[in-house]
Image (tube, coloured by chain):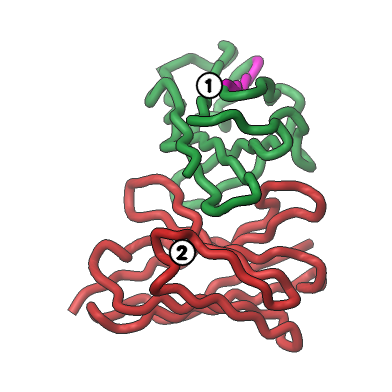
Amino acid sequence: EIVLTQSPGTLSLSPGERATLSCRTSQSVSGTYLAWYQQKPGQAPRLLIYGASTRATGIPDRFSGSGSGTDFTLTISRLEPEDFAVYYCQQYVNSPPITFGQGTRLEIK
Amino acid sequence: QVQLQESGPGLVKPSETLSLTCTVSGDSINGYYWNWIRQPPGKGLEWIGYIYYSGSTNYNPSLMSRVTISVDTSKSQFSLKLSSVTAADTAVYYCARRGYGIRAFDYWGQGTLVTVSS
């Protein structure tokens, strides 16, 4: 099983600041198989990024993804009030199981 | 607009079988992989398994002995059965679609809370 470790656990920032979220995988993963989601309280997760760096439909360009191998990053260039939420990374390699990171909580400072 | 809607009992007794159905609207069920994912209260996401529209399945090894996912393309529905439930199976259960040609879940249901309690 591929384990995903996200850091930090909680990130406290102010609107307008830049957010950098990390996801490290326990074994090398093709970027094709790495995705990021945003989840707000009481809502289902929303796909932000797939293939490590491709924005999903309707996702603002302040969200960007990068990385390869075992280290991946989600960057929010300039935080808007609606961006404060929990973010999950996920890997989808062929062999089961599909796994998620434990999440990073992005909170208003 | 693709929509997924979970339905089923919100309360299940220990040792019994949890049964949920996901109804898909706004697009064909054909050609896609359909997934179940759960989230215990206050915790992270756990993938349960998927079914391809043709009926082939793949399950999380940690749940494989208790899980069955089936599909009814004529009704645009797929279903989850989880047997011998315990309190540890209490969670919000989501159905989700793997996007065409991508390795990610592009559409999700709103989720349904299932509580295991006597």
Chain for numbered disc 1 = A
Q: Quadrant of the N terminus of chain B?
A: bottom right
Number of numbered callouts drawn: 2
Say which residue label 1 marks. A21
Say which residue label 2 marks. B93
Image position, residue A80 (x, y; %): 60, 24
Q: Residue at x 44, y 22 (%)?
A: A7
Q: Which residue of the protein is positioned furthest toward the left in this rendering? A: B118
Residue A56's label in the rendered image is none
Residue A104 lies, with reference to residue B101, above or below; the image says above
Q: On the rendered structure, is A63 left or right of B38? A: right
Q: For the magenta stretch, what is the residue range?
A: A71-77
Q: Colour of chain A?
A: green
The amino acid beneath tag 2 is Tyr
The chain that appears red in the image is B
For this rendering, which residue is in front, A89 or B109?
A89
The amino acid beneath tag 1 is Leu
Judge the density around disc 1: few (<14), some (14-19), many (≥20) Cα neighbours within 10 Å.
many
Image position, residue A29 (x, y; %): 62, 32
Alpha carbon distance from label 1 to label 2: 26 Å
For this rendering, which residue is in front, A72 or A18?
A72
Q: On the rendered structure, is A61 left or right of B36? A: right
Q: Residue at x 57, y 21 (%)?
A: A71
Chain for numbered disc 2 = B
The reply to whether the magenta stretch includes residue B80 is no
